[in-house]
Amino acid sequence: MIRHITFTLLFAALVFLPLSAMAADHECVVENVFIILSSESPQTQGMAMVLANTMADEGATVDVLLCDAAGDMALAQGNGGPQLAPRGFTPGKLLGALVEKGASVSVCALYLPNSVYTETDLAEGVAVAKPPEMTALMRDPKVRVFTF
């Protein structure tokens, strides 16, 4: 009888403890997101911005670093790229919506020195990245980093 009770308790512990740990993992919500976008593809840029806006809408703090050709999205006088189906938004307009939601957006520290643009060409709310700040975000265990 005691052996049966001991076996039952051991079995319950082996089955239900891992299940409760998995349930706890599902409740863990990422609150800080760092998106590094360097793709020149309008669809990749657009999807990165759709996901970033969705995460911001869900309450995440969003930081974005635009490098290489993706830096063009941050230009004040740019067209923001082509309109993308199904809603006709451009990656640049989606980036603007993200800034309006309070996201921190920066262009790579190498973007301006290696282009014909200056800091005055950037859209409102877009800064030039400072490598130590970007590194801190990348190393912070509370921040989930996504690259596109």
Image: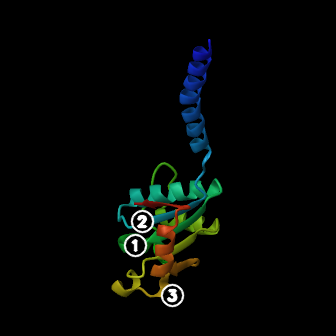
The residue sitting at 62% across, 17% down in the picture is 5
The local secondary structure at tag 2 comes to strand
| Residue 14, placed above or below residue 39 | above
Name which residue type carries label 1: Cys
The residue sitting at 52% across, 54% down in the picture is 51
Name which residue type carries label 2: Leu
Whether tag 1 and tag 2 are in contact, CB under 8 A, the answer is yes
| Quadrant of the rendering where the N terminus is positioned | top right
Q: CA distance from mark 2 to mark 3?
A: 21 Å
Q: Is residue 129 visible?
A: no
| Residue 141, percent from left and from top | 52, 62
The local secondary structure at tag 3 comes to helix
Query: Who comes first in sequence, dot 1 or dot 2?
Result: 2
Name which residue type carries label 3: Thr
Q: Which residue lies under the disc numbered 3?
A: 120
Q: Which residue lies under the disc numbered 1?
A: 67
The foreground one among 116 and 13 is 13
Q: Nearer the viewer, mark 2 or mark 3?
A: 2
Q: Is residue 136 visible?
A: yes
Q: CA distance from mark 3 to mark 1?
A: 17 Å
Instruction: Judge left or right: residue 87 versus residue 38.
Output: right
Callout 1 crowding tier (Cα within 10 Å): few <14, some 14–19, many ≥20: many
Q: Which residue lies under the disc numbered 2?
A: 37
Q: Nearer the viewer, mark 3 or mark 1?
A: 1
The residue sitting at 60% across, 48% down in the picture is 28
| Residue 123, percent from left and from top | 53, 78
The residue sitting at 44% across, 71% down in the picture is 66
